[in-house]
Amino acid sequence: MNAEKKSKMIYWASGIVSICGIIFEVIFGALGSYIIGDGVKQYTLTISLFLTGMGIGASLSERLNKNLILSFVWIEFMVAVFGGFSSFTMFGVTAFLPNGTESLYLYLITLIVGGLTGVELPVLIRKANQLGVTLNKSTARVLFSDYAGGLIGGLLFVFWLRPGLGMVKSAFFVGCINLGVALYILWIFRNEIKGWKKHGFVGVFIGVLLVGGLFFGEKLAFSFEQKMYKDPIIYMENTQYQKIVLTKEQGDTRLYLNGSLQFSSADEYRYHEVLVHPVMSQADRHDDILVLGGGDGLAIRELLKYEETGDITLVDLDPAVVELANSSYHLLELNKGALKDDKVTVMHRDAFEYLEKSKEFFDVIIADLPDPNNESLNKLYTKEFYSLVRNHLKPDGAMMVQATSPVFAPEVYWTISETLSATGLNVENFHVDVPSFGNWGFVMASRENIDVNQLQVKADTRFLTTDMLLSLTRFGKDEDQEIIENGKPVTLEPNTLIDPHLLEKYEEAWINY
């Protein structure tokens, strides 16, 4: 093969390994988002570390002036091993090593693969130059292949690899591609490499490991992931928005979204009865009801206990959650098929976007949303969002918001309450003991004054009674609004889009739980 054809092979190789590099980069970000939490933070850290690694690798590449092709081949071997096994080992580290180790491991593997990726292009550019292509021309072509490959890699991950193969198989598959490029380049330039066959045998051995991981790694990783949950996993799905896990043990069904517990069938009725019945008592009418989140159908179940309940609109972003709630025997047993009721209309929209565009008004609005543990969810706990909710309330309507734990995260809970109050609404605070969660808080808001003594529980319940309501508004010293820090009261400010400080408070509060 002449020099011109070999140089073309180098350009193709640079494009392909660039595709692999960007896929590994986003895999690391996705792993951090799922296992560690706070997607924006994890993607920011992984991208920064990956680019830093590339810079370090590019600097170290100056020392590689001989045996460029062999150097490239071994770089790809190492990328294939470290990158290919990254997802698999991440689940193992999370399952078996102490809490916090997974973060260090993820950042280390990101830096290593980034460093190896940073060595690739300078080596290929020097080799292209040795083949008689001018430096400027070879650099421009290789960089074009690199940048174009980055775009292709991102699109492949989002639209094919992640939904089709999942995190573990995707990493092994991409590692196989890196290895394939290395072996092909080794074959093309075999006449330049002394003892090229022994290097080929090493590559074949790595290939056997990667193919084994591709076919069997996910099953082993599933057993690792099982250790992250208390009970056996009976259902798991990676959707466009999140990872859904359903577990069951001795009659206790639990739903997890991105690793966070959403409910336990053993005590979810305590949570949902407090979420629904006080606000239904506060509102004068129940003709039009809006539920934000709550795709499991459990809040809808409680709402349908009222004969006078009119139209219910459920807005939940992920259709997979609603589909599971309508198809899984375990969930249907809990929600009583509530989402299939003729009164219920389901819409798969972002709650913020829905409220911005909707012209409807509601008697009752219930925000049964996941905790504000990332930027996207934090947006749904801001003054701007609650102002939108207020604007869709009828004059005598009322709303209820789940607001995390006043015991484990008191500043978070009372900041949510302060944010609601900042919209001009009257607020009342509730909390209840839910054994699977701990002590959990809610905030009711209305334009009308809220007199808890006038509230009544008029539906059939398993836990909540009218006599209990007043006690749910009483808070102990360690969960009261007068939080003391370093001997001084903490001043709580509303959470806003411009100043989303609630996310930081949430991370600090839950770091040890």
Image (cartoon, rainbow, N blue to C red):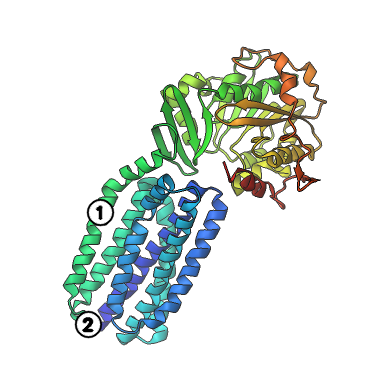
* Left or right: residue 282 compared with residue 240: right
Residue 408 versus residue 39: which sits nearer the camera? 408
Q: Amino acid at mark 2?
A: Asn
Q: Which mark is residue 211?
A: 1
Q: Residue at x 54, y 19 (%)?
A: 342
**Mark closer to the observer (1, 2):** 1
* Left or right: residue 335 compared with residue 311: left
Look at the image and tell me in which quarter the C terminus lies.
top right
Q: Is residue 344 visible?
A: no
Say what secondary structure mark 2 lies in.
loop
Q: Please tell me how crowded label 2 is: few (under 14), some (14-19), or many (20+) other residues with Cα within 10 Å.
A: few
Q: Which mark is residue 388?
A: none
As drawn, 171 above or below 128: above
- Identify the residue under disc 2: 2
* Left or right: residue 236 compared with residue 366: left
Q: Residue at x 45, y 70 (%)?
A: 54
